[in-house]
Image (spheres, coloured by chain):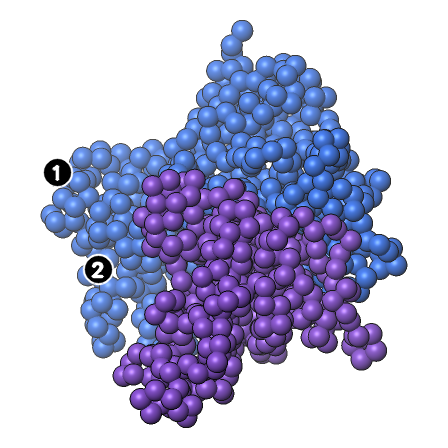
Amino acid sequence: MAKNSQVIKREEVVIRFSGDSGDGMQLTGTLFSDTAALSGNDLSTFPDYPAEIRAPQGTVGGVSGFQIHMGHSVINTPGDYTDVLVAMNPAAVKANARWVKPGGIIIFDKDNFTEKNIEKAGYKSDPVIEEKLDSFNVIDAPISTMVKEVLKDFGLDPKSVLRTKNMFALGMVYWLFDRKLKYTEQYFDKKFVKKPEIAQANKVALRAGYYYAETIEALNPVIIIEPAPIQKGTYRNVCGNAATAWGLLAAAERAGLRTFIGSYPITPATGILEEMAARKDLGVKSFQAEDEIAGICTAIGASFAGYLAVTSTSGPGMALKSEAIGLAVMTELPLVIINVQRAGPSTGLPTKTEQSDLMQALFGRNGECPVVVIAASTPSDCFNFAFEAAKIALEHMTPVLLLTDSYLANSSEPWRIPVVKDLPEIKPPFADINEKPFLPYKRNCETLARSWAIPGTPGLEHRIGGLEKTMKGNVSYIPENHEMMVNFRAEKVAKVADRIPDLKVYGEESGDLLVVGWGGSRGYLITAVNELQAEGHKVSLANFNYIFPLPKNVAEVFSRFKKIVVAELNLGQFADYLRIKHQEFTYRQINKVQGIPFTISEIKEKCVKILEEK
Amino acid sequence: MAETQSLQYTPRDFKSDQEVRWCPGCGDHAVLNAVQKALSELGIPKEKFAFISGIGCSSRFPYYMDTYGFHGIHGRAAAIATGVKTANPDLSVWEITGDGDALAIGGNHFIHAIRRNIDINLILFNNEIYGLTKGQYSPTSEKGIVTKTSPFGSVEEPFSVGELVIGAKGKFFARTVDANVALSTQIYIEAARHKGTSVIEVLQNCVIFNDGVHEVVTGKEVRDDRTIILKHGEPMIFGKNNDKGLVLDGLKLKVVKIGENGITKDDLIIHDAYEANPGIQYILANMKYPDFPVALGVIRSVPGNTYETDVENQIEKVRKDSKIKCMDDLLASGSTWKVE
């Protein structure tokens, strides 16, 4: 292919595809990220779609987006502001114009900017004028006309023809970034092996977009992003929900157990149940329950019966499960509970992200009811923390609550595939068949975990349940026994701190400001902190994955910094928790509750302000 | 397997060392005896039994059984039992529940367990009252009942257990009386052998808060005339003198007296518990005194696929066809690339 002469190298670039929810933007974005990954770039992606499956066409409420951040260096976030915006209709401009970097490129389908669509998007006049887009590089391509033209001899119905508009737009973007078309072409050949005319139509539209961009010299110079220096190995793209499911399955394999998941569909956690349901080939028993409570209760039953048992949900579902979590605490059964957090309270913003279920995770149950709480930080480390959640649950005979969030669940990034036999061993404390009579609440002196006797094993018959018990498993109302058992359960969970890694500091080990985060905002915080460091500030980051119990070196780390700021997507839940656990420090806060992640710039701005404070 | 040598159980083998703490005279004692008797006759190794309960007086049951047991939370026994059975279909799973536990707070799990036809045996102790919370009306209490939470009489219509079971696509429904240990034992054995969700409603007496609620039907003096014990393949006959029966009158059942109006035993309908169409079974399950005798025995017992077996079979089939045999296969499947 002829290439125009001038090229420019960039470290990173952000691209956002947006259009009506029927415009195929998620597929377009996914195909672009696959090509980027196969070209050796590091990347991070984030789909942003409406809760309504088909919101009224052409309205802002119906805009679906997909953002990709790719680079020559390590990419930690899907990016906040975008270099290129593809907007298939006026509503997409309306929803996204404010996220385009000054001087960025906006590609739109001119044919879709009819008076009716402009009005539907809520504009009174030309969006280019209303949004003051003249400072951007606006490419108004007649995409609909062009695809009709190139596909006129295909004999396809008009609807099928217009469905290839997204590929035309993708072709244009491929030209802008000097990308190969072959990976996307291969996708269509494989996907439509039985409908070659559809495959061909998409490929033709893709190529037409590419040549169109070249012809009009849409961008000069073309931007090149060289491959990132990446560790050797085999890679794939993975999103948080799939990584979570796979981490659990890997744990089951390492423990020699089968997996049971009892869940009720709920946004944004459903992907975990779906992935598990697809894994019958690995012997997974997936149970789509009649409600959230049945989800966890069937999982508790399966755990009693000797499975690695899991229930996955989001905040509202967690609320419904809380009584049963208490039952799992009381019966001291291994159980992994996953909360893919979304913006609340109540139904809140179901498709949007937030970190506001922390207090619910820590304290949202009746009685003294300790549960291990851990949180994952990136889409791919959902795998590691799901594995870790299962390992802790199985070895310590306790429910473990894994917090991810909508942003992690749906974002994807390249991931170096691990070899399962290299993952840590998992050794549940199975009861000794010769130890009769079996005492269900007799504890291992080191971990305080009880042993696991599986129904079907001769001679280990026993009873457990939600009522307070003695070591023998008999119901007891003796005051001292209750207090002793409450303390045992608390200490058992506290002892998990003995095995978890120390809190790590990104950047200098001491300095003027420690940015503290937890879970899914790590990517944003580390990018902001890196940039602040590059600008000469003595700022470091500590991002928590182990929330309860906390790592043992927290106070030691905190004491090395002059100021501490806790940044989280809620009103200050982790900050308040730290105020309980480590009262000797003063915590400043950066908070955001808009259903969207932090932007790098807002974190930096607030950090600088804090650094300047006397 | 050990089954051949050591399965000479007696009911005593199923008694735990725990002191039974139900009120003296409570119907639960008789249910416990009948279940222990039935279990000893099933030929199933003891370690394969799991008793799962919810909350309520009857839900203390697992503590008194020397088997695997799980005392759950209110209403959720069906869900817990479903998890146990799905995980390990080899177990004989029994759910112990009451009218409040199964039909009020646990109503959702109850109907869905039945719909899925998971192979558990569900004993529903129906005393038409909340006992453990000391006397409030339940979803099976008769309209008008005066209790602590209905001091002026309940204004709610009760559920009929059999009707609900059949409505939820239930394939096995039986009814017994707590004190009738012989009939109960027989029913528990049949329930255990039936593949699918077996619901057994026990007309159980709460001596403290609803004493004698079933007495009008189950009382020693009247029970022969006011109940009918159904047996598959036998005519529907009842009465102290075995002189009453049921005939089909159009789409309804009618009580007749043998010898009157030329009615003979041959005119009575034959009970068919295995008939898939629930029409007559539905009418039988809903018969009420004084118009009809209350039906006891196995009213409906229809074979069908069970959830846990279908799950296993599906896994088996997918496993055979899939190239993915372990996690490493899965992780390497799909779109991957190598960085050298």
Q: Are marks 2 and 1 on the same chain?
A: yes
Q: Which residue is mark 1?
A: A124
CA–CA distance between discs 2 and 1? 23 Å
Q: Which subunit holds the residue at mark 1?
A: A
Q: Is residue A45 above or below residue A536?
A: below
Instruction: Name chain A's colour.
Output: blue
Q: Is residue B234 above or below residue B313?
A: below
Chain B: what color?
purple
In the picture, measured across the screen, residue B108 lies left or right of residue A57, that is right
Circle 2 Cα neighbour tier, 10 Å, few/some/many (<14 / 14–19 / ≥20): many
Disc 1 residue type (three-letter): Lys
Residue A461: name its quadrant.
Answer: bottom right
Residue most extreme to the right: A434
Q: Up-down: is A153 above or below A457?
A: below
Instruction: Please report, as a chain letter, where disc 2 is located.
Output: A
- Name the residue beneath numbered marker 2: A144
Q: Nearer the viewer, residue A468 or B208?
A: B208
**Residue A53 percent across, percent down from the top left:** 31, 54
Of pointers 2 and 1, the one earlier in the residue sequence: 1
- At 59% across and 20% down in the image, what residue appears? A579
Q: Does residue B35 appear to the left or right of A209 in the view shown?
A: right
Q: Nearer the viewer, residue A269 or B181?
A: B181
